Image (tube, rainbow, N blue to C red):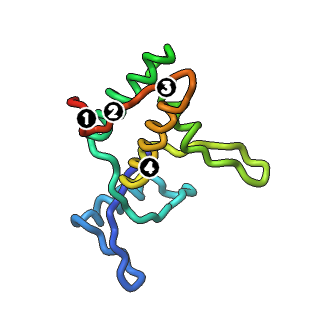
Amino acid sequence: MITRRFLIKPKNGQLKFVRNERDLFVEALKHFDNKLIWLSLKKPFNQRTLQQNKYYWAVPIALISEALGYEKDEVHEILKWKFLLIPGEDGKPDRVRSTRDLSTEEWETYMDEVRRWAVQEPCLQLNIPEPNEVEI
C-alpha cells in the first residue's frame, strides 16, 4: 500500500499545493487508477519532537518497564490503552489512538497523565522525572 502525504492549502475550492508537489500528487494517483480509494482531509498539527520521543522511551517507558518487568513495547501498549482509549460506539470495538497522532498539547497531557498514574499506582509508586530534570 502506498501512503503519501501532501501539504495543500485550499483556496476558493481549488487545491494549492505547498512546495510545488502537484506533479507528485498526480503521479501518486496513477497508482490507484480504476480503484476505489479513501481521501482524508485534516489540518496539520505539530507532532512531538525527536527529543520528546527520546525522553518517552528512555525515561517513563524504561522506568515503568523495569518496575513491572514488561518489555518496553508492552508498556507502550498498556499506556495507550489506559490513556488513549476510544470507546466503541454502536457495537463497534474499542480502539486506541496512536501516540504518533497526538498534537504537542495532547502529548503533554498524555505525559502528565502517565507521570501522575505512575506515582499513584500502588504497584509502582514511581516518581518519573520531568524532561528538564533528566539528561538524555
Q: Which residue is drawn at 53% across and 37% down?
A: 80
Q: Which residue is drawn at 33% across and 33% down?
A: 129
Marks counted in the figure total: 4
Which residue does the numbered mark 3 point to in the structure image?
125
Q: From the viewer's perspective, is residue 26 above or below residue 55?
A: below
Q: Which of 81 and 5 is in front in this view?
A: 81
Residue that sits furthest to the right in the current view: 91
Q: Tag 3: residue type?
A: Gln
| Disc 3 crowd, CA 10 A, few/some/many (<14, 14-19, 20+) | few
Disc 3 to disc 4, C-alpha distance = 20 Å
Q: Is mark 1 on a helix, strand or loop?
A: helix
Query: What label does residue 109 carry, if any?
Result: 4
Query: What label does residue 133 carry, if any?
Result: 1
Q: Tag 4: residue type?
A: Thr
Disc 4 to disc 2, C-alpha distance = 15 Å
Q: Which residue is drawn at 32% across and 27% down?
A: 58
